[in-house]
Each structure stands twice: as structure tokens, then as C-alpha cells.
Amino acid sequence: MQGTIRKQLTVILTGVILLVAGCSSKTKPTDENFMAGLNAYYANHNDCLFPSALRFPYEVSPGPDAKQDKQRMDALMNSGLMKRTEDQSIHVEVYALTAAGERAGSRFCYGHREVTSIDSFTPPSKEANGMLKSTVTYKYKMMDVPVWARTDEVQKAFPEMAKALLGDATGENTLANAGVGWQIPD
């Protein structure tokens, strides 16, 4: 009789453990799982002013299209990240990185996102490759922001960055799940 009770308790305990484990699964489409996937991605992916590295020395030629480019380069120069010289022979302004600019890198990254809440997500749909996908809209704040990115002149020259630094920015990403948790596909 005692063996039967022990077996019943083992079955019940195993069922409870499986139920609890199933409820906390990383593969379920929950706000917590989406936040974990987004934050894991952004911990290793900074937001930058430029999508690819600028090549230095960087030249700005005079003309109607150069106004915004010059404003941006001058803002970075006034923040101590670049120095400017003028090449009178070809009528261009030449920008080079300072020591501080070299530390910032030629994409001028200004921190990484930390997701603070999930606003919405689409119902997960199964793709042809068997992965589940969902588009997630979220709020985030920027972390590890350097001093130069907080200057008024740089924020005026780069309004998208300024908007992200406000502390309540919104983003959207498609996340995929192949059975190991929600991730941003690379």
C-alpha cells in the first residue's frame, strides 16, 4: 500500500514540476520572453549615428547638399571627437578623428537599448522553415550613453539620436523562435 502511495505522490509531483516548467517556458510568446530576447540582443549591439564606419579623413565639399553633413561633422568636432582643416586648393573641409574620436569609433555609437516594456506583438506565425515569428513593439531607454552624445549641438544635428535619448523611445523588431527562445535573427 505504501508503495502505491509513493508512486501516486511521484506522479503528482512530476506533473506539478512539468506544469510549472511549461508555464515558464522561454518559447512562449510572453512580454517577459520578448523582453529577454530583445535585451540579450541589444546588450551586444549598440545604436550608432552611422550605419557603417565613416572613412577618415572625411571630406565635405561646399554645395546645397553639404549643409546637413557639415552641421553634423561640426557638432562632432565641437564635442572634441574630430578636428577640421580646410584644403583651399580643392575647396573642401577635411575632418580627422581626435584621440577621443578614435575611442568613440568611426560609427559613433552612443549606447545600447534596454527594453523597459512591451507595447504589443503580433500573433506568432509559423514560417516555411518551421520558425515562429512575431513583430514586437516596445519602449526602451538608452544605457551607457557617452558625454558627447548628450550635448545640445550633437542632439540638434542628430534628431533621431536625441529622440532615443529621451528615455521613452519606441522600437519595433521581428523576433524568431526555433525552440530555444525568442531572438532577433541576425
Image (spheres, grey):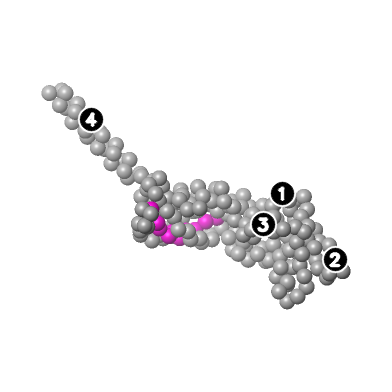
- Majority secondary structure of magenta residues: strand
Q: Secondary structure at mark 2?
A: strand
The answer to whether 2 appears left or right of 37 in the picture is left
- Residue 122 in sight in this render: yes
Question: Which region shows up in magenta?
Answer: 131-141
- x then y, percent, for residue 34: 43, 52
The residues bearing labels 4 and 2 have C-alpha atoms spaced at a distance of 82 Å
Q: Is residue 56 left or right of residue 183?
A: right
Residue matched to label 3: 53
Residue named by callout 4: 10
Q: Quadrant of residue 163?
A: bottom right
Q: Are marks 3 and 4 in contact (CB under 8 Å)?
A: no
Left or right of 126, for residue 41: right
Give the distance between the C-alpha atoms of the residues marked 3 and 1, in whole angstroms.
13 Å
Residue at 67% across, 66% down? 156
Q: Which of pointers 3 and 1 lies earlier in the amino acid sequence?
A: 3
Check disc 3: other Cα within 10 Å, few if <14, some if 14-19, many if 20+: few
Q: Does 174 sit above or below residue 33?
A: below
Can residue 124 be seen here? no
Query: Where is residue 25 drawn, in percent x and y?
Result: 36, 45
Q: Quadrant of residue 71?
A: bottom right
Task: Identify which residue is drawn at 33% across, 40% down.
Answer: 21
Nearer the viewer's eye, disc 3 or disc 4?
A: 3
Q: Residue furthest bottom?
A: 64
- Given the image, on which type of amino acid does mark 3 rest? Ala
Write down the residue under mark 2. 87
Contact flag, marks 4 and 2 (Cβ < 8 Å): no
Q: Residues within 10 Å of mark 4 (few under 14, many from 20)?
A: few
Distance from the alpha carbon under mark 3 to that under mark 4: 60 Å
